Image (spheres, rainbow, N blue to C red):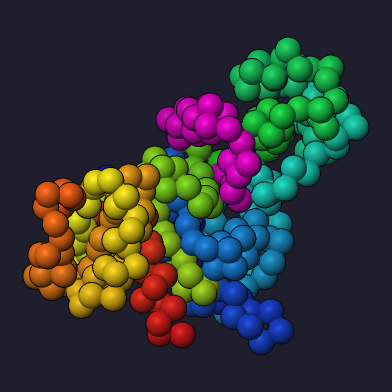
Amino acid sequence: MTSPAPVIEVSELTKSFAGKIAVNRLSLRVEPGEIYGFLGPNGSGKTTFIRMLCGLLQPDSGRGTCLGHDLFRESHLIKPQIGYLAQKFSLYEDLSVRENLSFMARIYGLPKVRTLVEEAMERLGLARFADQLAGTLSGGWKQRLALAACLLHQPRLLLLDEPTAGVDPKARRDFWDEIYRLSAEGVTALISTHYMDEAERCHRLAYLAYGELLAAGTAAQVVAASGLFTWTITGENVHLLASGLKKRPGIEQVAPFGTTLHVSGHDPDLLQAGLADIDCRLYHCQASAVSLEDVFISLMQNRGGQS
């Protein structure tokens, strides 16, 4: 039995603006129904890549397909099958929730607009806001409205560009519940995010910096491939240790997390030696699991040192 074709498959994809490379020879593959996380600092090329996938930008070189269609020659066939959610709320703030959804349904040329809009509002919990102006909604409800709009035409692929930025934790959790429901229905999602907890919710993820792919795989695979080791130090005023620890051999990064320090490096013996003289009467040191945030900070530090 042959496996289904990937929803996204690109190889050596490159895009530059005025001589500055935004995406540099990017290769990745996203499978049907997969929730694929796309991470990286601002300016790393995430949005540029998403815009190439949905036909808003044409790549300079490389090759790729999206939903079985060539990115260079068939972007007009890709666009109708994609739901694109931009970083900034892009619906009409002076129209009601119902009016916005009705307008978008007509733009898509969809039949039975009234029924479709009512079903969309019910699914996303928007029915009680049907006649409220979109501009008066909170950030979380604006996000739900935008998601409802990009689902109206039943897309096979969602491209979501930092969709939960600026919304509260409850709204973020509700959003992810909906993404998992869609995934179970066979909808694929490529989601860019800065949140590590959201990255861990993805089936697989990729990390970009300076337009280059630095890591890809499941969260566990990315952590394992990093070769990083982490110790945690707890105790009163533990943050006072940070500046001194950063200067020691084998200690590559020191990150405070509340009343705990995460101390990481790639050489486990040097790392442990660098912590050997910590006063155990004042502080507790122990080897701990490496977090995605530890890995991504390390990737950025190492990549920055090469630039």
Asked if residue 263 can be seen in this view, the reply is: yes
Comparing 252 with 56, the one in front is: 252
Q: Which residues are magenta?
A: 157-185
Which quadrant of the structure image shows residue 221? bottom left
Name the residue located 51 percent from the left edge and 44 percent from the top edge.
189
Residue 148, how many percent across, how many down? 67, 30
Residue 45, how many percent across, how many down? 57, 67
Asked if residue 49 can be seen in this view, the reply is: no
Which quadrant of the structure image shows residue 295? bottom left
Q: Is residue 28 above or below residue 250?
A: above
Name the residue located 37 percent from the left edge and 45 percent from the top edge.
258
Residue positioned most to the top: 128
Q: Is residue 241 above or below residue 197?
A: below
Q: Is residue 250 above or below residue 52?
A: below
Q: Is residue 210 left or right of residue 117?
A: left
Is-magenta flag for residue 170? yes
Q: Is residue 175 above or below residue 205?
A: above
Residue 208, how many percent across, how many down? 46, 66
Comparing 286 with 104, the one in front is: 286
Q: Is residue 177 left or right of residue 4?
A: right
Is-magenta flag for residue 103? no
